[in-house]
Amino acid sequence: MEILSNLFEEKDRLLILKVHLYLTQANDHLVWSKELSRVYSVKSGYDLLQHTQGRWNGNDKELAIYWKHMWNLKIPLKVKNLMWRAGMNFLPTMVQLRSKHVNVSSLCPVCQIEDETILHRLVSCPEATLSQDLIDTEELDRSFKRNTQSWAEEVEDEQMMK
Ligand SMILES: [Zn+2]
């Protein structure tokens, strides 16, 4: 008590005294708050990193609903697969390879003009998979910068209008 009064002001001392201390002799241990089991998993660690780095803006439930909706669309499976891989950043671009510390140039191997990002590979490259008349590329570029999920939604909407 004397230490508390020597070190802390009255207001802080009262708050400290309100802290409930367990009387058992259990040892402290680390827990991982992102799993119900309180045990760390690589998946939950990865999910946390994705959230903290702004790679998706919705919660997991919204994202699951979105992807379920996308997979139910009546469009070719290969288009859905491409959208999913682009949305999850799973397309093997040169920029992705560099991010995995592979010693390659990040330039697009087709046009040698810009870095090969997913957006470049699918849209802005002169040899892009998705033709420029299919999508408003300036709007798509802005959208892509917001996040990849909204980009995939816009591609999906374009597909729905056809
Ligand atoms: Zn290119």
Image: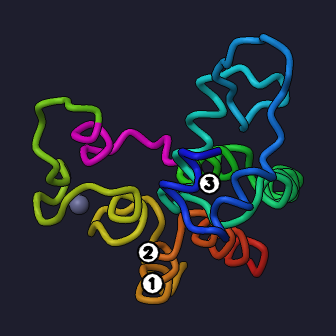
Q: Amino acid at mark 2?
A: Lys
Residue 156 x, y percent position in the rendering: 70, 68
Cβ atoms at labels 2 and 1 below 8 Å apart: yes
Circle 3 Cα neighbour tier, 10 Å, few/some/many (<14 / 14–19 / ≥20): many
Q: Which mark is residue 114?
A: none
Q: What residue sits right under mark 3 in the picture?
A: 83
SS at badge 1: helix
Comes first in the chain, label 2 or label 3: 3
Q: Residue at x 76, y 81 (%)?
A: 161
How crowded is the residue under tag 1: few (<14 C-alpha within 10 Å), some, or many (20+)?
A: few
In this view, the residue in front, 8 or 145, is 8
Residue 65: where, in percent of width, then height? 87, 57
Mark pair 3, 1: CA separation: 17 Å
State which quadrant residue 34 falls in.
Answer: top right
Residue 85 visible in the snapshot: no
Q: CA distance from mark 2 to mark 1?
A: 5 Å
The residue located at (67%, 19%) in the rendering is: 28
The kind of residue tagged 3 is Met
Q: Is residue 117 toward the left or the right of residue 7 in the image?
A: left
Residue at 20%, 59% in the rendered image = 115
Looking at the picture, does residue 10 appear above or below residue 161?
A: above
Which one is earlier in the sequence, the residue at label 3 or at label 1? 3
Mark number displayed over residue 145? 2
Could you say which quadrant of the image residue 131 lies in?
bottom left
Task: Give the image quadrant in which the ligand numbered 1 is located.
Answer: bottom left
> Which of the two residues, 20 or 154, is positioned nearer the viewer here?
20
